[in-house]
Amino acid sequence: MILEWLLPSASTYASDINRLFDVITLLVGIPFLVASYLLFSFILRFKAKSGRKALYITGTEHQYIKWIHRAHIPILAFDVIIVVMAVNVWFAVKQNLPEANATVRVIAQQWAWTFVHPGPDNVLDTADDITTINELHVAANTLYHFKLESLDVLHDFSIPAFRLKQDAIPGRVITGWFEATRTGDFLIQCAEICGIGHALMPARIFVESSEQHSAWVEANSPISVAAR
Amino acid sequence: MAESIRVEHAAHHDDHHEMSFTEKYVFPLDHKMIAMQYMFTGMFMAVIGGFFAYVFRMQIAFPGMDVPFFGPVTPAAYNSLVTNHGTIMIFWVAMPVLIAAFGNYLIPLMIGADDMVFPRINRLSYQIFLISAVIILAAFFVEGGAFGGAWTAYPPLSTKSQYNLTPLGSTFWITAVALEFVAFLLGGINFITTAMNSRAPGMKMWDIPMVVWMIVIASILFMLSVGPLLAGGIMMLLDQNLGTAFFDPNRGGDPILWQHLFWFFGHPEVYVVLLPAVGIVAEVITVFSRKKLFAYKTVLYTAIGTGILSFTVWAHHQFIAGIDPRMANVFTVTTLLISVPIAEMLFVYIATLYGGSITLTTPMLWALSFIFEFLIGGVTGIFLGASGNDIYMHDTYFVLAHFHYTFYPIAIIGTYAGFTFWFPKMFGRMMNDKLGKIHFWLTIIPFNTIFIPLFVLGAAGHHRRIFDYRNFPELSYPWMWELQHLATYSLIVMLLAQIIFFYNVITSWVSGPIAPKNPWNSNTLEWTATSPPPHGNWPDGLPTVYRGPYEYSHPDRKSSDFWPQDEPA
């Protein structure tokens, strides 16, 4: 609700993260408001008045300490709810790797993104692959794996509209997934500082309908380009 | 043993009663003078760190402008300002002021000792610290400029000059940080030993004022956590200069290793600076609400519990850094568990106010605002500790706003609470309360209007350390620029308000009303020494302790609402 209002969501798991954010807001908001209310009401209620002496409370008396102990119950309960929801979302996005319809390679470097798309054969690392700079083309409602690499320093492949973020590490290939739910073009950021050009790495992801996407693949595959 | 150290030290300063200017102010052995050296070096560095923030906030809000008093901001300058703002504010402001300055000043005075047990190590600690401060600033004047790879200095960016373009700056950075750790290790040894061995006769464990306990626990946390990072720092230095490959993936190294070493220290470090601040707040709120601290032992146990837990949460900084995704589940649980002792601590402080007789002096305003602002910092941490949500929030302005809501209450609010509270003791004069309150409101309101907009921007997808958002159409809507402007204007107001503070300090120091021994009717031992205390603190003999530090408004005591620790029953 809150995140959706600030930034539209465009992937299958974006709504899960939006919901998690709302639940956390509610569950930390309640203790925050209660604690703030008590703090300010005590400050106003117990302002110094001449002739009134403060109470002498050690804090070990049952009648007082019980309130501190009772406060733990909702906090622990809220913690459990948040942990369970967070771990479920995490598992779905990061730990679980559903079967893919297609795979793209994402290569980060100072200061540009290289995207390798499979060609008409839908297999990566064949002669008909399409390589682009700072433009990623995918089909909507299709589950993609991405193979994330870096050529130099740490970068971070972040698509805010998908609620997706993953660091790229030189020397490793990190596999993740996404499935876009609506067409349009969205921002790709580098979210890990990578030198003086860190602000110069915006790229875009173009989510197309499957017909549009097939047409784009057909038009841009080096084999079909060569045949023309 | 403690007795013999004390006698020896007393004999030592009897021999040299007339100290020269150099002995007294430049190479002092007196804990109070060393504390002042740390305090004013820290404040000087805070002014520099604040100026850096002004320059890069101007660049963010008005990209490409000619920033007054600086000039146009290049991407390289922007990165080095952001990096060194963070580094300086944590390692050269929060650490020296909260741990070293308050620790040095308060521990001997509050436990009734004439000085630290190792005065020469204490002096050495400051000297190493000063050298490290010179090195971090010198980096701005070397070939290539200061390091710009963020205060976390993730390799390979930090280790290879062809990537960071600051061949000398990055070496200066890690050298300065490593030396600074050495300085605080030496200081920490002193704090722990002094608090355990040199307490006044009669002062049992549960009679130690909370702030002393907190500084001791913080020093222990620091000593246990800093080793891995110091080792990591040396590995980084070797990688940069001698061609080793600890963090170089092309030659069998691992860049993620540094992140583990850094955050294994980095997260306990938050509590290293937090604990002294909550200790200061405990002293201030008990005095100005005339209340006994609610559940003294509970506060102590929550501090120890938080300290232990803080060693088990470091990887929540690395959820999406490429570590095994299964680890995130473990670290989400440990991270959220920290909410239990921290919430307990804040509840106990709020409970201390219950039934009190509250006077809103300047230090009390700072202490109460600490509770409220830190509460915001605490609850926003839950958003980031929850792994699923951190996928989206990581490295956004939401993170930045969250940790400013923790570090700002700690380093700035905690320091102002302590400084205005002990000012009469430190300088023998009272501060101007009216100016103090004007300074308080002109600092606390802009603080909130800087960082609340940044929470919103972060939730809308603004990522950190970006020098020009005009490249990002989704991050350049007019309402976003308005929030950026609000944050920047607020920062300028807040920085200008600090002039009031320095004016107040100087005029009060020179011509404020003379402070009595115990202006706040406080119980703890430092208020039984003269204001300011002489070398040796109590020249006529050290005090003896008869009761705990928080016996305010005791029913058996009819004559007044406080009961000094050193007054015989």
Image (cartoon, coloured by chain):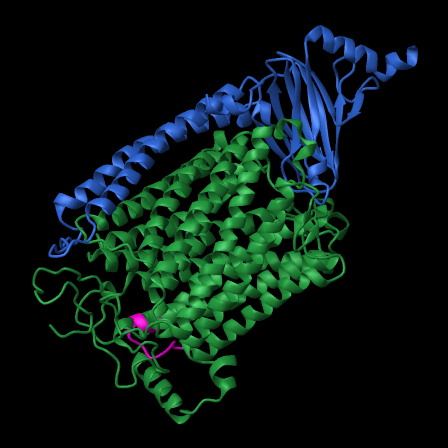
Chain colours: A blue, B green
Q: Residue at x 61, y 32 (%)?
A: A166
Q: Position of residue B29 (x, y in %)?
A: 45, 80
Q: Is residue B267 magenta?
A: no
Residue at position x 36%, y 87% in the image: B8
Q: Quadrant of the N terminus of chain B?
A: bottom left
Which quadrant would residue B141 be assigned to in this image? bottom right
Q: Position of residue B487 (x, y in %)?
A: 53, 41
How many numbered circles does the render carry?
0
Give the answer, above or below, for where A154 lies relative to B562.
above
Q: Which residues are magenta?
A: B107-117
Q: Residue B327, percent across and down?
A: 50, 36
Residue at (73, 62) in percent of width and height? B142
Q: Residue furthest bottom?
A: B15
Residue B28 higher or lower than B460, as above or below: below
Q: Left or right: A223 with respect to B374?
A: right
- Visible residue check, residue A217: yes
* Front position in the image: A123 or A106: A106
Q: Residue at x 54, y 60 (%)?
A: B47
Instruction: Look at the image and tell me in which quarter the C terminus of chain B lies.
Output: bottom left
Q: Is residue B275 visible?
A: no
Image location (x, y in percent) of residue A170: 70, 40
Please tell me whether residue B262 is drawn above or below residue A82 in the rendered image. below
Relative side of B184 to A138, left or right? left
Residue toward you, A215 or B363 = B363
Q: Quadrant of residue B438?
A: bottom left
